Image: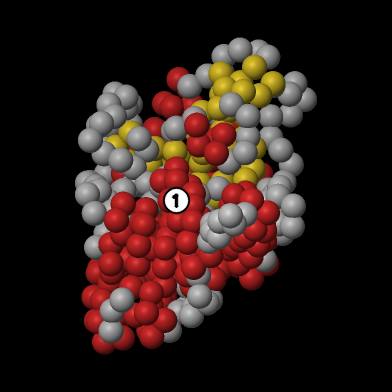
Amino acid sequence: MTIVTNQPTAGSEMRVEDDFVRLADPFRPEILAHCYRMLGSIHDAEDLVQETYLRAWRSYEGFEGRASLRTWLYRIATNACLTALEHRARRPLPAGIGAPHTDPEGDLSAIPPEITWLQPFPDALLATEPAGVAGAVGADPASVVAARSGLRLALVAALQYLPPRQRAVLILRDVLGWRAAEVAALLDLTATAVNSLLKRARTRLAAVAPDAEQVAEPTQAPQREILDRWAKAFVEADVDTLMQLLTEDAVYEMPPQPMWFRGAPLLRRLLAFRLGMHGKHRKMIPMIANGQPAFAVYSGDDDRLLAAESVQVLTLRGDRIARVTTFRTPGLVAVAGFPMEMEMEPETEVEPELEA
């Protein structure tokens, strides 16, 4: 007796999986960036991307192509993020939760456990790489461009003030440039509702961060000179040079420590105090985070081995540094692709150039 079954064979399952990986993997960088904008956490974003791709793979045989695969992935990812945000508070930076601190020599060790901080996004995670599966391809360049849009730290921090659905609409409409009808279809809303949510989101964003994306940076060569001088001075604890590179109203913050400081006089005291107490050796490795110049920072008292300390993201305004956000969570250095320990180089402590 012949038994007829509709169950797929192992060979057909493998073909479906290979087909899905080949077609869906090029969108992974922009889906990761989208989840990060929504959640403000690279760790949570990576988890949600895994969940998105698992859901999509399980449903791929039933995918009927009424929308593009990219739109379908965004729909799954956005809904997963909205669910994840239902019971979560926003992720702030220190400058977003209170007045600036005025005692840079005071105890800076208090870390409030109830606050979950915004995290940086290392641009290395958007690198075009093969997926490691037969038939897979690297990220499409257009997908990487979409992923890099709207990642600046100030904008992502400002997005956290928006209710989740407003956040999703603003990201899809203003950051990614989707049409109202496309967003409405993705979120099961009317175009009128989408436009209403967008209007409220823009109003709120203008109130909490009116200049979130209006940053005029120097061109490549002057920027490299500024960053090289900053890194060298930081390694050498040269506070005078550091102060020459900062604007008069510069902000310095160090999550997970909640205190933050503004203005040259306080920053001079802060830098002199902190650089004098955190290891006699330092090393700065250039990187890019949130589309901004950044450094992986290592420090220690050992003459041979340095330990990962922080990821330092800089916001430039003209030919000066207007904000230093030092994420003092060593594990973020590993997320950026660097080792947790590094041997000291006796000849030089500063890499010569910021990576492209």
Relative to 284, say whether 90 is above or below: below
91 relative position to 31: left or right: left
Q: Residue at x 63, y 29 (%)?
A: 339
The residue beneath circle 1 is: 51
Residue 167 at x, y percent in the picture: 32, 66
Q: Residue at x 45, y 39 (%)?
A: 326
Relative to 322, say whether 268 is above or below: above
Q: Nearer the viewer, residue 316 or 184?
A: 184
Is disc 1 placed on a helix, strand or loop?
helix
Q: Nearer the viewer, residue 216 or 307?
A: 307
Residue 162 at x, y percent in the picture: 27, 63
Residue at the far right: name it. Answer: 347
Which colour style is shown? secondary structure
Evaluate whether residue 147 shows in this view. no
Q: Nearer the viewer, residue 207 or 243?
A: 207
Q: Nearer the viewer, residue 83 or 220?
A: 83
Relative to 53, say whether 254 is above or below: above
Q: Residue at x 49, y 49 (%)?
A: 50
